Image: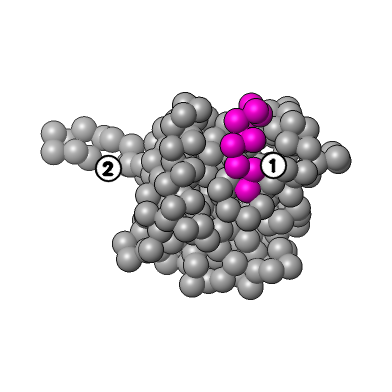
């Protein structure tokens, strides 16, 4: 089934395919999406991942077909990556950004614009809500994380699996998200190709940005670890 993606701050219109399958009774069921929600491209100064490489990796992957481009304090990589992904009807790029706030990093999913400065946590979260995006506290219990201070702000989710965090830090993030009754997301935080998809999310959504964002906000997301990953 083909759908048109039309959302606020979208870069262009393009067609996406909703994956379906039949169960043992012959009924059509919607298959979940699998997504890496925290990736850096060369538009982050410390990343080596080219947009084309990311798209090629998604196209070749057997089930992870969705990725969020979340460069440091920049949305310049979103346009190039979305353009490249438009050639593949089963690949979806979620535009986003990782903002360095005054207290730690917040990922905003679903925007091609930067929030106005100053980048306080409250201002970034308010911006996210104003454009219909999703605010995620990135790696809360490691360097550049907000820690328990994140609980003071009306964020949408907590990153409970981060590919660059220790198992202990990820476990602490899981407990923190549970204490706040917030959804937990996963992101490889990849800066090199070898780091892509080390952790990922199972999301009950259609293959379009709006549906994915809505599903995350409602908690229809399950953070998972790739086979062989050291992150638990």
Residue 172 higher or lower than 28, as above or below: below
* Pointer 2 residue: 21
Sequence-earlier tag: 1 or 2: 2
Pick the residue in front: 206 or 219: 219
User: Which residue: 17% across, 36% down?
Assistant: 26
Residue at disc 1, secondary structure? loop
What residue is rendered at 36% in x and 59% in y? 226
76 lies left or right of 155: right
**Is residue 45 found left or right of 110 in the rendered image?**
right
Q: How many marks?
A: 2
Q: Are marks 1 and 2 in contact (CB under 8 Å)?
A: no
Q: Indicate left or right for 191 with 222 as reference.
A: right
What is the number of the mark on residue 218? none
The residue furthest right is 117
Question: In the picture, residue 130 is in which quadrant?
Answer: top right
CA gap between label 1 and label 2 equals 31 Å
Residue 224 visible to an observer of this rendering: yes
Q: Position of residue 166 (x, y in %)?
A: 47, 58
Q: Give the mark toward the camera: 1 or 2.
A: 1
Q: Nearer the viewer, residue 139 or 77?
A: 139
Question: Could you say which is closer to the camera, residue 132 or residue 40?
Answer: 40
Segment tinted magenta in the rendering? 145-155
Callout 2 crowding tier (Cα within 10 Å): few <14, some 14–19, many ≥20 = few
Q: Secondary structure at mark 2?
A: strand
Image coordinates for residue 112, horizontal then vertical, percent: 72, 45
Which image quadrant: the C terminus? bottom left
Q: Look at mark 1 in the image and give the residue it sits on.
A: 111
Provide residue 159's location: percent of width, then percent of height.
52, 44
Is 122 in front, or is 8? Answer: 122
């Amino acid at each position: 089934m083909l759908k048109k993606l039309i959302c606020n701050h979208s870069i262009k219109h393009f067609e996406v395919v909703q994956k379906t399958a039949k169960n043992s009774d012959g009924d059509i069921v919607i298959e979940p999406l699998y997504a890496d929600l925290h990736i850096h491209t060369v538009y982050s100064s410390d990343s080596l991942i080219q947009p084309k490489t990311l798209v090629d990796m998604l196209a070749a992957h057997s089930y992870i077909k969705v990725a969020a481009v979340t460069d440091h304090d920049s949305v310049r990589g979103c346009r190039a990556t979305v353009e490249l992904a438009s050639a593949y009807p089963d690949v979806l790029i979620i535009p986003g950004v990782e903002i360095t706030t005054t207290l730690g990093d917040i990922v905003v999913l679903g925007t091609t614009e930067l929030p106005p400065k100053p980048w306080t946590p409250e201002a970034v979260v308010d911006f996210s809500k104003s454009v219909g995006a999703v605010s995620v506290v990135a790696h809360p219990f490691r360097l550049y994380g907000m820690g328990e201070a994140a609980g003071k702000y009306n964020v949408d989710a907590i990153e409970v699996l981060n590919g660059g965090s220790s198992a202990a830090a990820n476990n602490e993030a899981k407990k923190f998200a549970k204490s706040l009754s917030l959804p937990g997301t996963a992101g490889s935080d990849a800066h090199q190709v070898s780091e892509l998809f080390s952790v990922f999310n199972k999301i009950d959504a259609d293959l379009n940005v709006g549906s994915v964002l809505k599903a995350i906000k409602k908690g229809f997301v399950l953070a998972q670890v790739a086979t062989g990953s050291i992150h638990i």
